[in-house]
Image (spheres, coloured by chain):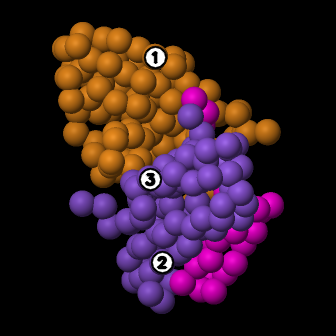
């Protein structure tokens, strides 16, 4: 059983749609929350590392928010493009070296 | 740019064979990790190393061992491969602990027949 949960598991949207995914994690002993994008046939790449409650980070059309008290993070993509198609992974760190990953949200953007 | 490379993209081995998966990073990172990825289960940590010759078990170490003789190289060893070890294996490295992003290799898809 994963204690980092991501929803939905998969998502199909049309080009131009905005979308968002959820990552929920244990709120106790929080240290950091990571988001990664994993495109098919490529390596996972870091999008954001967030550490403070209320953090908001943005990279182009992608942004993320963090609520450590209630244990969730949202990833938003504004105006989805086909090149955004990927699996989006979140991972929780409670100090130390280990990350606990969620199962991922697979996004498919249709042109 | 950080580069993490893995020795093979695809590998097919027979049950009972000893299997070595090699990972090399070129950014002088202290920490290196081995994960496996299975559908619906996310990335699960097998082992990690925070220094040369140092290792710690992750969530699913059974059936695996690791070796880190040099800082840039981290090897995953399947002593006697079994069919339930068929999976995608990903290596990663990071500069420091949990607030540092991890850099991943391209993965090795291992099939054990």
**Which is nearer the eye, B42 or B19?**
B42
**Which is nearer the eye, B77 or A37?**
A37
Q: Are marks 3 and 2 on the same chain?
A: yes
In percent of width and height, residue B85 lies at 26, 29
In the image, the chain rendered in purple is A
- Taking B65 as reference, is B49 above or below it? below
Residue, disc 2? A72
Residue, disc 3? A10
Q: Give the range drawn in magenta.
A: A41-67
In percent of width and height, residue B22 lies at 50, 23
CB contact under 8 Å: marks 3 and 2: no
Q: Quadrant of residue B1?
A: top right
**Which is nearer the eye, A111 or A82?**
A111
**Which is nearer the eye, B2 or B10?**
B10
Taking the spot 55% from the left edge, 25% from the top edge, the residue there is B6
- Helix, strand, or loop for circle 2? strand
Residue lying at the far bottom in this picture: please name it.
A69
- Helix, strand, or loop for circle 1? strand
């Amino acid at each position: 059983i994963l204690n980092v949960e991501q929803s939905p598991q998969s998502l199909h949207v049309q080009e131009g749609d905005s979308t968002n995914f959820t990552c929920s994690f244990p709120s106790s002993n929080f240290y950091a929350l990571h988001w990664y994008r994993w495109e098919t046939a490529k390596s996972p790449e870091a999008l954001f590392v967030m550490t403070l409650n209320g953090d908001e980070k943005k990279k182009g059309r992608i942004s993320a928010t963090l609520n450590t008290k209630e244990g969730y993070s949202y990833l938003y993509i504004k105006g989805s493009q086909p090149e955004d198609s990927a699996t989006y992974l979140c991972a929780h760190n409670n100090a130390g070296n280990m990350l606990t990953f969620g199962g991922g949200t697979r996004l498919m953007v249709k042109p | 740019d950080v580069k993490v490379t893995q020795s093979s993209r695809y590998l097919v081995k027979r049950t009972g064979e000893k299997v070595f998966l090699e990972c090399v990073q070129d950014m002088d990172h202290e920490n290196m990790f081995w994960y496996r990825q299975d559908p619906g289960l996310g990335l699960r940590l097998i082992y990690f190393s925070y220094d040369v010759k140092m290792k710690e078990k992750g969530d699913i170490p059974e059936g695996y061992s690791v070796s880190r003789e040099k800082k840039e190289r981290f090897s995953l060893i399947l002593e006697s491969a079994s069919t339930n070890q068929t999976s995608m294996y990903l290596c990663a490295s990071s500069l420091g602990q949990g607030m540092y992003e991890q850099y991943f290799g391209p993965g090795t898809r291992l099939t054990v027949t």
